[in-house]
Amino acid sequence: MQEWVAHLRAADPDSEYLDLGRLGTPDEHITTVLDSSEHYELRWQVIRAHASQTSPFEIMPPDLQRSFLATDRLRRIRPPWAGGPLERNLIGDGDSSRARTSR
């Protein structure tokens, strides 16, 4: 989020998004990182389908767009996070070494 804010300040310093205050979840609170790259194009189609709304992704350079739309960063609340390596899969298969891998 901080990269996006820095880019937005330079590209559109009057953007209403900059009035939202601190954005994003601190890295140390992220518990789960999912690769959603297979849905990247579909996500863009859905975003662009809302022509009456301006997407914050439109002003981003392509590499930052991909970073946002091809990876989901989540914070697990229930059950409470006990720490450990980042989860890379929401549906465990009983093999915790595959369901959770470190950064």
Image (spheres, rainbow, N blue to C red):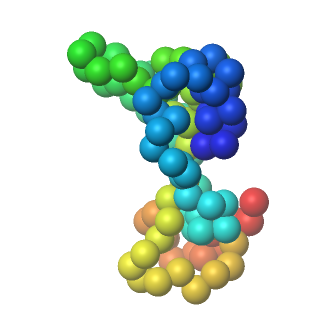
Q: Name above or below for residue 5 compared with residue 93.
A: above
For residue 20, above or below residue 73: above
Q: Residue at the spot x=59%, y=23% of the render?
A: 13
Give how far across and how far down residue 59 sits, in percent: 54, 18
Indicate left or right for 83 with 34 as reference: right
- Total tally of numbered discs in the picture: 0
Quadrant assignment for the N terminus: top right
Please tell me in which quadrant of the rendered image residue 83 appears: bottom right
Q: Position of residue 42 (x, y in %)?
A: 38, 25
As drawn, is 81 to the left or to the right of 97?
Answer: left
Identify the residue at image location x=47%, y=71%: 76
Of residues 8 and 19, the one drawn nearer to the viewer in this rendering: 19
What x and y, as percent, mark residue 84? 68, 79
At 50% from the left and 59% from the top, the residue drawn is 74
Please report the residue visible at 49 percent of the width from the left and 25 percent of the height from the top. Answer: 15
Residue lying farthest top?
51
Query: For this view, does 19 lie left or right of residue 64?
Result: left
The residue lying toward the viewer, choosing from 59 and 67, is 59
Residue 97 position by quadrant = bottom right
Farthest residue, direction right: 103
Can you see residue 67? no
Residue 36 in view (yes/no): yes
On the rendered image, what quadrant is the C terminus found in? bottom right
Q: Position of residue 9 (x, y in %)?
A: 63, 27
